[in-house]
Amino acid sequence: MDERDLADNPIAQLHAWLAEAREAVPQADAMTLATADSSSRPSARIVLLRGIDERGLAFFTNRTSRKGDELRENPRAAVVLHWWELGRQVRVEGAIEEVDEAESAAYWSSRPRASQIAAWASPQSQTLATRSDLEARVAEAEQRFDGSEVPLPSSWGGYRLVPESIEFWAHRDNRLHDRIRFVRSHGGWSRERLAP
Ligand SMILES: Cc1cc2nc3c(=O)[nH]c(=O)nc-3n(C[C@H](O)[C@H](O)[C@H](O)COP(=O)(O)O)c2cc1C
């Protein structure tokens, strides 16, 4: 990977790599999301990248989940995308903001009904005594919304990771990989090469 092969804007570059990954890899949009609580204790899980533009990277979840609690306490995050088949990795770090309700509602309405019911039924990240408790909650939600659209729960919505740095990593032989990091500066982006 040569610096000159990359777009000047890392968001455009991420779009380009994502498009190639979607052709080559199942679930190319799955990314590891790292958050930390107020005492800096980290946690990580996979979420789906559901929007990317100049504002940042959007993902959707239950805001009363563990990640939601941590993002409230400490609104910063890091994500990693990895595409083994392409020998590529992207790391993004920055601040977190909430996606507004209109945008969350638009994404919500694109989801399959069963996923909407699941979001109502599942108190994400809470302990459950048994699997049947969850199934009973699903049955309850199905009955509650029988014959009507499933509305956006107040606890559900998107977050946007507003990037401060975006690193593009490409595999090279003998562990001499390429790493180019874009860092936000003066309203634009500067770039630097990192040792592998
Ligand atoms: C491929 C894949 C995609 C996932 N996408 C999402 C997602 O977009 N949003 C979400 O809330 N959880 C998603 N999950 C589930 C999360 O990994 C996690 O179990 C859940 O959000 C609870 O995390 P938390 O307890 O840390 O808040 C996904 C899991 C996998 C394996």
Image: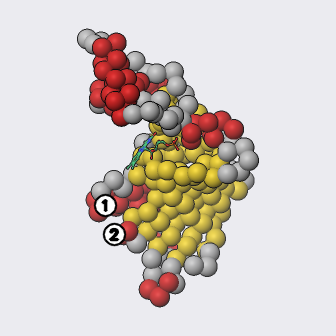
Please tell me how crowded label 2 is: few (under 14), some (14-19), or many (20+) other residues with Cα within 10 Å: few
State the residue at coordinates (54%, 60%).
Answer: 91
Q: Is residue 112 left or right of residue 156?
A: left
Q: Is residue 119 left or right of residue 112?
A: right
Disc on res. 78:
none
Mark 1, residue position: 25
Q: Where residue 134 sits: x, y (%)?
A: 37, 29
Identity, as a three-letter code, of the amino acid under mark 2 = Glu
Mark 2 or mark 1, which is nearer the start of the sequence? 1
State the residue at coordinates (55%, 73%).
Answer: 179
| 54 vs 91: above or below | above
State the residue at coordinates (45%, 77%).
Answer: 171
Q: Are marks 1 and 2 in contact (CB under 8 Å)?
A: yes
Q: Where residue 147 sits: x, y (%)?
A: 25, 11
| 122 vs 181: above or below | above
Q: Where residue 50 sits: x, y (%)?
A: 42, 42
Please identify the residue farthest to the front as the structure is shown.
Answer: 129
Q: Quadrant of ligand 1?
A: top left
Which SS class for mark 1? loop
State yes or no: Cβ of the residue under disc 1 lies below 8 Å from any atom of ligand 1.
no
State the residue at coordinates (61%, 79%).
Answer: 195
Kindly tell me whether residue 36 is visible in this rendering.
Answer: yes
Which SS class for mark 2? helix
| 132 vs 167: above or below | above
Please identify the residue farthest to the left as the structure is shown.
Answer: 147
Disc on res. 85:
2
Q: Nearer the viewer, residue 34 or 171?
A: 34
Q: Nearer the viewer, residue 116 or 1?
A: 116
